Image (cartoon, rainbow, N blue to C red):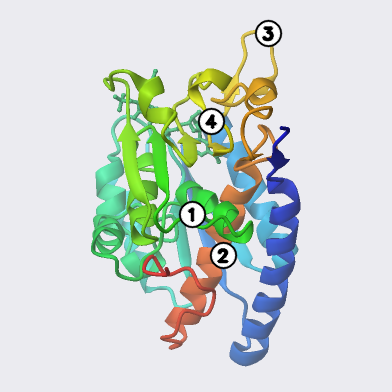
Amino acid sequence: MSATILDGRALSATIRGELRTEVERFREKQGYAPGLVIVRVGGDAASGVYTRAILRIAGEIGVQARVEELPALTSADELRALLLQLNEDQRTHGIIVQMPLPAHLSQKMVADTVTPAKDIDGISPGSAGNLFLGLPSFLPSTAAAVVEILDRHHITLAGKRVVILGRSNVVGKPLALMLLQRHATVSVCHSRTRDLTTLTRQADVLIAAVGRPRLVTAEMVRPGAVVIDVGINTLPGGGIVGDVDFEAVREVASAITPTPGGVGPLTNVMLLKQCVRAAWLASGHSEEPLGLSASQA
Ligand code: NAP
């Protein structure tokens, strides 16, 4: 058997097209575009690449995005003051603060300060709490990207056994809650999990978010399982691979995401989708205009 390839680039293009239409509809109704502000402190090179990628997609779909560049020596009070000002700004619907921050600034302060209504990457305790309770919420964009891939390929989750490798706050944990919401039976594994293969071989859907190149081998996968690879690992000699041994596992799985070209291209698109949703909600639309509710079954 050779698995169906779950093509993240193609899906990203489809969703960007949908968002373009949605942003146009918003503009016609409101007279202005959804607004996004990306805050960068200290000019980290990797976050610069990430920022440019978000700006490119924002420009393509018509979201008004700008970057607030702050010097590395910005104090916690100054950063907090900017975030409070953006919380109040009626034309800013989504706020992202790029990580990593300089050591003297706290990620917790940022998460506590950005208002949940503009927290489009789902980092705040309020967003996490809503997700926990199954209430509508903004979601961490990588976890949202995984669920979007499963949904768009009509991979049903109710009653399925899902095994997630990784328990980070941005991927593994929120994903577990989102899949539980969709009635899957979810196991979350981590670095202390014993006898990983026994667990992974039980999975109807296996999701790897570990950060270990090709950790998941063909022997760890139940024939016919769906395999989603979140990992992005740069090899010492160059080249990018996922957490899954793609070439071997594709012969066993029924469907699989490639790396690159799987989850990665969808992550920023999900961020912008949530920005557009935030704009609709801020303009008084209480319904779920883009179907991103955490409680969606
Ligand atoms: P992270 O915070 O480093 O978490 C990694 C998780 O994997 C931890 O829970 C860790 O366990 C677990 N783990 C480590 N070694 C393991 C092993 N041998 N067996 C089982 N579990 C193990 O990483 P992250 O931020 O969630 O990211 C995970 C991967 O996804 C990375 O490769 C990252 O680059 C990629 N990523 C991709 C996107 C995207 O857009 N596609 C976005 C974000 C992240 P402990 O908790 O016990 O330490």
**Where does residue 124 sit, x and y in percent of width and height?**
30, 55
Location of residue 89 (image quadrant): bottom left
Q: Which residue is mark 4?
A: 231
Tell me the SS state at disc 3: loop
Mark 2: amino acid: Lys
For disc 3, the marked residue is 237
Can residue 68 be seen here? The reply is no
Mark 3 burial class by Cα count in 10 Å: few <14, some 14-19, many 20+ = few
Crowd tier of the residue under label 1, counting other residues whose Cα lies within 10 Å: few below 14, some 14–19, many 20 or above? many
Q: Amino acid at mark 1?
A: Ala
**Disc 4 residue type?**
Gly
The correct choice, above or below, for 163 with respect to 215 in the image is below
Q: CA distance from mark 1 to mark 3?
A: 31 Å
Q: For the residue marked with disc 3, what is the amino acid?
A: Gly
Category of crowding for the residue at label 2, using alpha-carbon neighbours closer than 10 angstroms: few (below 14), some (14–19), many (at least 20):
many
Horizontal side, residue 132 vs residue 144: left or right? left
Residues at badges 1 and 2 in contact (C-beta under 8 Å)? yes
Q: What number is the disc on residue 273?
A: 2
x and y percentages locating residue 117 in the rendered image:
36, 70
